[in-house]
Image (cartoon, rainbow, N blue to C red):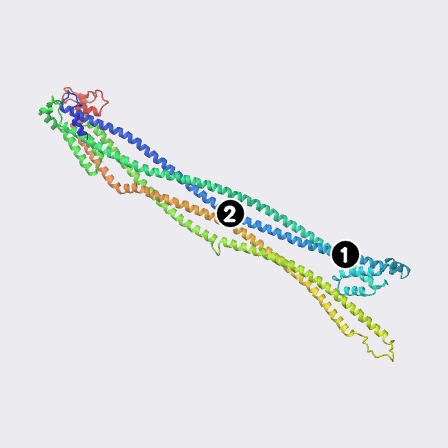
Amino acid sequence: MKFFVLFALLFTNVSAGDGTITKVMKLLQEMLDKSKAEGDEERTLYGKFKCYCDTSEAEKNDSIKKGTKAINVLESKIAEIQGATGMLSSEVADLKAKMADNKQARADADALRGKENEAFKAERSDLSQAISQMSDAITTLAAIGADQTKSTGADNKQFMAGKGSLLSLSSQVQDALKAASALMSAQQRKVAMAFMQGPFTGTYTSQSGQIIGILKDMRDTFRQNLADAITTEENALKSYNKFTEVKEAASESMKKSFEAKQQELGDNDEELSSKKGALAEAEKQKASDEEFLDTLIPMCEKKAKNYDTRKMLRANEEAAIAEAISILNSDAAFATFGSTDATSTGVTSGKGASFIQMRAVRKHMSANAHYRGLAQKALEVAAKKVKSARLGKVIALLKAENPFTGVLDEIAKMIDLIAEEGKADKNKLDWCNTERTENDKALAGKKSDIISLGETIDKLDTTINDPDTGLKAQIEETETTLVQNTESQKEETKQRTEDNVAYQANIANLVQAQSILKKGTKVLKAYYDDLAKKLEAGAALMQEDPDAPETNFNMGGQSETGNKVIEMLEFITDETNKEEMKAHTDEEGAQADYEDSMAKLKKEESEAEKSLSNLQKTLADSEEELLQARVDLKETTKDKESIVAYLAKIKPGCDFITTNYDDRVANRKTEKEALEKAVKLIKATPAYKTAMAEAKVESFGDCKKPCKADEKDVKCLACMADVTVPAYCAGHDKVKGC
């Protein structure tokens, strides 16, 4: 577009005193300077924008990285809290069940203690009453026996008269003997029964001493039984109190643990809610950062493309301007302009404008132009081959008739830049190869770890949840065994208690039955014995009246049948006694079997509780290990995905450098060779050789005096560089005179 502006400026922005071509050259030079200034300004602006892009991208990437790490930590923490909550819930449920079992055990113990205490009280009452009866009977019999031993005369009668009636004494003795009869042997019971059934006349007999001995033995037995019962009751009470104390302590401990775990569950719920809120915020922030990057990166890439396009257009524009200057400043142009009025003597403005060339600026050396053209051609061939903007810039410098020293400096910088670029490409290639090798190795390791963790998780899951052999199944089976064991203990204890009560009732019935049978036997036997005596004593004395009618009374009555009944009663009594003895034996055996069974059940219960504790600990350890394995698997999977994402991210750049590395090396080689060839051609120019010489004696245009290289005469230096003073000063603005 500036070429259209050129012709508008051609008649407005140049000084009236300049020649036509000089004015055009100035305008072109101003355009070139302005383009460079705009390039510098745009470079500054783009640098700021690029800084913003890089800073923002780095900040957001760092924020995303931190957010991802925070999300991973929060997810892990949430999983940990949920696992702890699940474990706590299980422990709370277990504590609740154990507390209920503890409460039921104490209730059962209270009920059993009540029954035992009631049985003890009844037994104590019975034994105390029996002991009292024994003592009263012994006292009575001893008193009677003592009096009878001393005298059978007046003293005895006085004792008998003082008592008022021996019938009351007989009643006391009989009650005492009845109470003791259950524990008498058969012989003792026979003596006691004979003593009770005999007529009580107060006459001393040898039986009274024997009965007193029996009663004393029975009283001692009752006292011993009472003492044993009291000791048993005390021991049972101690055991009950100890059991209650242990159970209450365990209940209190479980209650505290239950409350603590409930509090911990509440804390976990609060922390879990907080962590979930933080996770949601972190995910929201990460999504916002990623959305910002999704907008920023395309925008920055678009701006970078626009800037590169603008640089290319500016370089082309500057090259065109430089080429125009070169064309206008060439030997042929000067020769042509000098022979044409419009270009040598014409004016640049006004009606009927013409171009006037007042005089030639300077003479030009054709050798310089020749070598410059050769250098341009070599660079153009190389630039076209490798599409190099760098070579285009050197071509523009040559076409703009810049000093050879400035061009050589620029070429030297480009050669250094090519070398640096080669090093950068080599570093990038090495970096890509290293990164890919290391990350491929790490990726393989992560995949192997994932497989290993998966196998570990499957194994732990089977160990925990297998329906047949898993820890949970074993715990459930052990708990069922414990419940069944407890039920068996309760059932056997209940059955033993019921059997004992039935045994005591049976013994009481058997004792009472024997007592009744013996009484009946005694009554019948006494009657028929007495009848037989009477019949034997009175039959001969009785005489019948001859006139009386015949009666044929059976004076013997049912003696024969009665004797058979007595035999039957005695047989039944003996069988009842045998049944009583067998009941005692069976009770002892049943009690021993109960104690053996309870000992076995207690042992099984202890072993089951120990096994349950071990299983629960193993389950807790396995679940913790399973949870950790799952967390590790999640982290490892994320690491693997991160590696895959990273490899995918570097793939385009690494694929480019890997694929194009050899071509880029070859292109740089071509550029370098072209630049080096241009250097040789430039150094072959007379102007360069002259500039490098110690002194120059040849005249250059308007320079009529010798011009040495170390002198600061601008015109001489411009002559040495084979350019005009303005063109020379464009590249050496700090030189005196520019």
Residue for point 54% across, 55% down: 480
- Give residue 89's mark: 2
- Where residue 232 appears, as percent x and y from the top left, is 69, 54
Query: Where is residue 361, by image quadrant?
Result: top left
- Where residue 315 appears, as percent x and y from the top left, is 22, 32
Apparent side of residue 325 relative to residue 133 in the rendered image (left or right): left
Q: Secondary structure at mark 2?
A: helix
Apparent side of residue 90 relative to residue 385 in the rendered image (left or right): right
Task: Pick the residue in front: 504 or 365.
Answer: 504
- Where residue 413 appears, as percent x and y from the top left, is 25, 31
Residue kind at label 2, given as amino acid type: Ser
Residue kind at label 1, given as amino acid type: Ile
Residue for point 52% across, 43% down: 264
The residue labelled by disc 1 is: 131
- Give residue 213's mark: none
Q: In the rendered image of this protein, does residue 670 appear above or below residue 696?
A: below
Kindly report the distance in space between the C-alpha atoms of the residues bearing marks 1 and 2: 62 Å
Q: Is residue 234 visible?
A: yes
> Quadrant of the image for the C terminus?
top left
Apparent side of residue 470 relative to residue 294 in the rendered image (left or right): right
Q: Quick one: which residue is furthest to the right in this view?
A: 154
Query: Where is residue 687, by image quadrant?
Result: top left
Q: Are marks 1 and 2 in contact (CB under 8 Å)?
A: no
